[in-house]
Amino acid sequence: MPGASLSGSWVSQLRRFVSPPPALEHCQFCHVAIAAKHPHLIEVSNRGVVCACSDCALAEAAHPGSPYRLIPQKTELLRDFAISDAQWGAFQIPIDLVFVFLDSAARRPVALYPGAAGAIQSLLGLEAWAELAASNPVLNQLQPDVEALLVNRTKGTREYYRAPIDRCYALAGLIRTHWRGLSGGTAVWDHIDAYFAGLRDEAAAVGRAAGHG
Amino acid sequence: MYESDRSDLGASLRRVEALIAALDRIADPAAREPARELLELVLELHTLGLARIIAIAAAAPGGASLLDRLAEDPQARAILLLHGLHPQEAETRIRAALDRLRPDWALRGIGVRLREVGGGGARLLATVGANGPIDTAALRSEIESAIVEVAPDLDDIVIEGLDEPQFSALAADG
C-alpha cells in the first residue's frame, strides 16, 4: 500500500486474516476436498509433489508399481551429526543451505541448493558421501526420494535435519519467492529464519515423542 | 468536531493494517496460528456482546435515533463496521458519501458515479470536465480514500474513467 494517507480497507484485511478463505485443495487421485494438513506424495520421475487424501495416499504407498512414493511427515534434528569443514568443502556447494536426497532412478545422492531461480541441482561426489555416511549412519536410513539431509550452515548455524522432501522443496519455494537482488534482501532472511524456527519446533515435538529430549 | 480522536483512530487503523501485513508475512502456520486464533476469539466475543448491546438499545424508546447517532460517530462507526453491525449496507454508505462530496467535486469539474457494489468490491466511474484536475493519480487516490473511509469492509475499490481502468492500490497486493 504505497503512501496511504488514510487507513485503507482495514476491516476486510482483518477479516481476511482472521478467517482465511478455505484452502481449495483436492486429492490428486480421487478429487475429494482435503484438509489443510494432508499427506503428500512425490512422483519419482519428475520429483513433483502431489496432494492426496489419506485413503489414496495409503493405497498408492501399498501399490508396488506406483510411480508415487508417500512422503513421511517426520522431521528430526540430527544433534550428533558430524561433518568437518573439510568434508563440507569437498561437496563444493556454493551456499550454506542445501538438501541432499537419494535419487532412486539415478541411484546416487543428489544435492539441491535453493536460490533466486529455484533449486539448483548438483551431483555429489560418491566418495565424499560414502565417507560422510560412514561417520553418520543415519544417512543410510534416509528413504530414497522422499527424505533428505537438510543442512543449514547460514550465519554461523550448524544444523542438520532429517526432513521430509516436501518441506525441503517448500524452503526452496520460499527462497525463490522472496529473494530480492543479489544478496536476497532482508525479507528472505526473515522467511528463512521463520521456516527454521518452525522446523525446529516440529523436530522438538518428534524428539519428545520419541523420548529423546 | 472530534479531530484529535479521528486522527488517533486513523493512526490505529493504519497500525492494524501494518500488523496484519506483518503477521501475514509469517510463512510458518505454527507461528501465525495462535495470533490468528486469539484475534478471531476476541473479535467474536466483541461481536456477540455488541450485537446484544445494539439489540437492547434498538428496542428501547428512541432506540432508532440512538443507533443513527452511533453510526455517525467515527469511533463507534469503525467498530460497527468491523463487526458487521453497521445499520447501513456498503452501497448506502457509499451513495451517502458521494452525495456529500458531489457539490464540492462538481465545482472542481469532477463527477463520480457508483456503478455497482458486489463481490466484496465497488466500481465507480469518474469523469473529469475541461476545467477539472489534471493529476489523475491524485484524483484517483482522493476518490479511493473517500470511499474506503466509509466502506473499509470492501476489498476492491475500482475507479474507472481515469486513464485505463486499474485496480486500486488499496486492494490486496500480496
Image (cartoon, coloured by chain):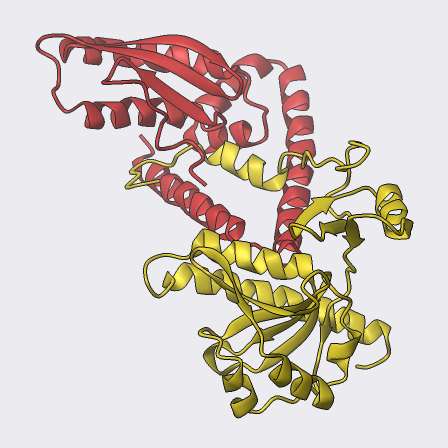
Q: Is residue B142 above or below residue A35?
A: above
* Residue in the picture at 49% in, 17% down: B90
Given residues B169 and A28, the one toward you in this image is: A28
> In the image, residue A177 lies at what x, y percent?
47, 51
Per the rendering, the colour in which chain B appears is red
Given residues A102 and B134, the one toward you in this image is: A102
Q: Is residue B18 above or below residue B151?
A: below
Q: Is residue A191 above or below residue B74?
A: below
Left or right: A130, with B76 as reference point = right
* Residue in the picture at 79% in, 60% down: A72
Residue A206 visible in the snapshot:
yes
Q: How many marks?
A: 0
Left or right: A69, with B22 as reference point = right
* Residue in the picture at 50% in, 85% down: A89
Q: Is residue A157 above or below residue A143?
A: below
Looking at the colours in the rendered structure, which chain would you say is drawn in yellow?
Answer: A
> In the image, residue A99 lies at what x, y percent?
60, 69
Quadrant in the rendering for residue B60: top right
Given residues A177 and B144, the one toward you in this image is: A177
Which image quarter holds the C terminus of chain A?
Answer: bottom right
> In the image, residue A103 lies at what x, y percent?
68, 64
